[in-house]
């Protein structure tokens, strides 16, 4: 899928900063700026390498300040907002197009000069390359200058103007960090200067730090004679070795094409999501395995998010070795039946505050087996799955336990163990302590899976089917909301029980459901009526007195709205799978889903190009919010495309 942005898409600075690109290197590092080449966030950076995969990131190069010199005339190619708007650089006025297919490409046209810039991040290495194809059709010599804006700080930190930088012909050094570079242009050096008033509009609207500081002390120059064409490049790397820029570009394009071909996905939007899914899969150095980053630019790798995203990002794309690698990482760290929600970094031990990651692990292994027929891995994972069920039955940490009725309850006090896990000091806006609906849907589904796996492996040591039937009867007796004709969100004896939330959709979309066909249809219709939007499901019905339609402002304002009506991208996958299920995967149902999924193409142009964001406002989904690129949002819709095309059904 090719994305083309023209003059009408960046007629103003504000319009041009509504979308950005993302490149990732499979090690936690990334490159991301707006489509006009500006930085609208602290976390926008031309080069954000990761020195210990996947979370030890350093903001090395914010951007390149680029100018075109024609005679005595100096023309800004760069775009950037400043605190004092009179300093704003409006290079986007010379930008004729921004294209994104495999890589981001900018085309500038100024007075007979055309400049085509391509950025590539090298997969598996902390290196970024910038290529300039310069066509000078004038009768004068021209020069393109590129001045790197430097930070050399941990991601999220602010550069101090006391930080010293040293630049040489081959590297730049500061605070013990060495950034190597290679260019076929000429480099000039000067005393380090600081700019302390970059303005980050996207951070400002969310009450984050909105002013940035950068340093600069050298400039690369590319001279092109009259009526000539030349190709120049700069490569930055955290290692003192470089590949050819053309090889970097061609190898990355070929790698992405192989991923698309291997997936077998035929839909064009689905193919784009295959490429996007790749950017979340990363090495994890501390475990020696793979992991999935939850979202860019804010989030790291979390157990729950990984288990939700894995089905689409790895299984629907047929990246089976990566899936097994991730499974094994989690299996290694499973403790008292709970998968880690946060992995260890340095001396920090894993944190296990999640009731759903372990249950989702079992269903993900089943999905993997369904797609791969790899019974050997099921046998390998089976002891861990048995251990999970045992601990959930007898009770484990975070008040996770099976009650006498067979249902799972979890959480107490200030514990946050489901995905609606915001805590603000001593306030839990959506605590959900008790018996959450999706947790018990996963529990029943897993018991049915365990019964099937037991028979396949001839390990029928426990009657999982008998327990599953007990769970089903209890669930039907406690969760059906007669008034709303849908499922309760939680059984807790509080007013939260009868709130209409998106969590009920997973009681229908799971492989083994407990509801009658009539009840499943009612749930799907209720979700469509109250919660469905083309970009995701509302987390709470607009009819509820606690409904918050807007997400933004201070941290308190954002967090109190986070699960109180905010639209989330990832439950949309569960909705579409549930819709297909209740309509028997008929051609009419598939066509309906294809038509509705077609609207996703619009959001792939807004926010982060080719990606689906974390959240949107409850009443207006015109602007993506939260993480501009979210793994489970992408992964869950990939599962839908695979289901429509019957890849793994």
Image: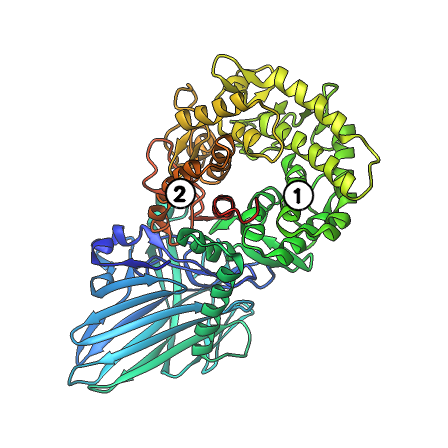
Instruction: Tell me the quarter of the picture where residue 537 sits.
Output: top left
User: In this orientation, which residue lies closer to the viewer: 562 or 103?
Assistant: 103
The mark nearer the N terminus, 1 or 2, is: 1
User: In this orientation, which residue lies closer to the viewer: 377 or 36?
Assistant: 377
User: Which element type, helix, strand or loop, lies under badge 1?
Assistant: helix
Q: In the figure, is residue 423 to the left or right of 384?
A: left
Query: Above or below — where is 425 with respect to 48?
Result: above
Residues under labels 1 and 2: Cα distance?
A: 26 Å
Which disc, if any, is residue 594? 2
Residue 250 in the image: state x and y as whole percent: 45, 74
Residue 34 in the image: state x and y as whole percent: 34, 57
Write the residue at 50% across / 20% down: 486
Write the residue at 76% across / 25% down: 466
Write the residue at 54% across / 32% down: 420
Q: How many marks?
A: 2
Q: Which residue is denoted by mark 1 in the rendering?
A: 366
Q: In the figure, is residue 5 to the left or right of 255?
A: left
Residue 306 in the image: state x and y as whole percent: 59, 47
Quadrant placement of the C terminus:
top right
Quadrant placement of the N terminus:
bottom left
Instruction: Tell me the quarter of the picture where residue 551 sits.
Output: top left
Q: In the figure, is residue 261 to the left or right of 320?
A: left
Query: Above or below — where is 397 with respect to 205?
Result: above
User: Which element type, helix, strand or loop, lies under badge 2?
Assistant: helix
User: In this orientation, which residue lies closer to the viewer: 73 or 542?
Assistant: 542
Query: Above or below — where is 140 with respect to 272?
Result: below
Residue 443 in the image: state x and y as whole percent: 67, 31
């Amino acid at each position: 899928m090719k994305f083309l942005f023209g003059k009408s898409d960046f007629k103003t600075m504000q319009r041009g900063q509504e979308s950005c690109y993302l490149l990732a290197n499979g090690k936690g590092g990334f490159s991301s700026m707006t489509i006009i080449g500006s930085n609208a966030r602290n976390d926008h950076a031309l080069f954000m390498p990761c020195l210990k995969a996947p979370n030890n990131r350093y903001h090395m190069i914010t951007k390149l300040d680029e100018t075109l010199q024609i005679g005595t005339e100096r023309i800004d190619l760069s775009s950037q907002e400043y605190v004092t708007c009179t300093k704003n650089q409006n290079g986007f006025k010379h930008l004729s197009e921004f294209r994104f297919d495999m890589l981001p490409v900018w085309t500038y046209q100024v007075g007979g000069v055309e400049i085509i810039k391509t950025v590539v991040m090298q997969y598996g290495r902390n290196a970024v390359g910038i290529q300039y194809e310069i066509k000078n059709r004038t009768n004068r010599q021209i020069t393109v200058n590129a001045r790197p804006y430097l930070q050399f700080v941990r991601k999220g930190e602010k550069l101090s103007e006391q930080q010293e930088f040293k630049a040489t012909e081959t590297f730049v050094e500061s605070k013990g960090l060495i950034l190597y570079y290679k260019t076929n242009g000429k480099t000039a050096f000067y005393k380090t200067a600081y700019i302390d008033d970059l303005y980050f509009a996207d951070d400002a609207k969310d009450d984050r730090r909105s002013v940035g500081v950068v340093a600069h002390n050298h400039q690369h120059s590319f001279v092109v004679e009259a009526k000539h064409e030349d190709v120049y490049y700069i490569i930055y790397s955290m290692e003192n070795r470089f590949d050819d820029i053309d090889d970097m570009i061609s190898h990355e394009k070929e790698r992405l094409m192989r991923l698309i071909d291997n997936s077998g996905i035929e839909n064009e939007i689905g193919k784009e999501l295959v490429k996007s899914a790749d950017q979340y899969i990363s090495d994890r150095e501390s475990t020696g395995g793979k992991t999935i980053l939850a979202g860019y630019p804010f989030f790291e790798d979390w157990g729950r998010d990984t288990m939700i995203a894995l089905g689409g990002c790895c299984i629907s794309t047929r990246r089976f070795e990566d899936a097994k690698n991730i499974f094994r990482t989690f299996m290694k760290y499973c403790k008292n039946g709970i998968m880690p929600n946060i992995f260890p970094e340095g001396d920090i031990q894993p944190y296990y505050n999640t009731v759903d990651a372990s249950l989702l692990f079992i269903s993900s292994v089943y999905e993997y087996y369904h797609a791969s027929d790899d019974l050997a891995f099921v046998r390998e994972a089976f002891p861990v799955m048995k251990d999970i069920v045992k601990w959930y039955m007898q009770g484990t940490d975070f008040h996770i336990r099976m009650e006498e009725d067979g249902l799972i309850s979890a959480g107490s006090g200030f514990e946050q163990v489901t995905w609606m896990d915001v805590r603000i000091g001593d306030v839990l806006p959506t605590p959900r302590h008790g018996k959450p609906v999706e947790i018990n849907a996963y529990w029943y589904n897993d018991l049915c899976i365990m019964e099937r796996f037991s028979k396949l492996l001839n390990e029928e040591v426990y009657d999982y089917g008998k327990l599953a039937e007990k769970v089903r009867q209890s669930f039907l007796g406690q969760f059906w909301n007669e008034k709303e004709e849908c499922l309760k969100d939680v059984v807790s004896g509080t007013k939260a029980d009868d709130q209409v939330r998106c969590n009920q959709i997973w009681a229908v979309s799971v492989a083994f459901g407990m509801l009658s066909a009539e009840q499943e249809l009612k749930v799907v219709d209720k979700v469509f009526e109250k919660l469905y939007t083309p970009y995701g499901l509302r987390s709470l019905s607009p009819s509820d007195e606690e409904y918050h339609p807007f997400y933004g402002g201070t941290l308190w304002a954002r967090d109190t709205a986070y699960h109180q009506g905010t639209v989330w991208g990832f439950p949309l996958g569960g909705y579409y799978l549930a819709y297909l299920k209740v309509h028997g995967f008929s051609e009419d149902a598939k066509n309906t889903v294809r038509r509705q999924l077609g609207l996703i193409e619009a959001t792939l142009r807004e926010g982060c190009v080719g990606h689906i964001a974390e959240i949107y406002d409850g009443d207006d989904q015109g602007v993506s919010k939260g993480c501009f690129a979210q793994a489970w949002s992408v992964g869950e819709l990939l599962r839908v495309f695979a289901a429509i095309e019957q890849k793994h059904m």
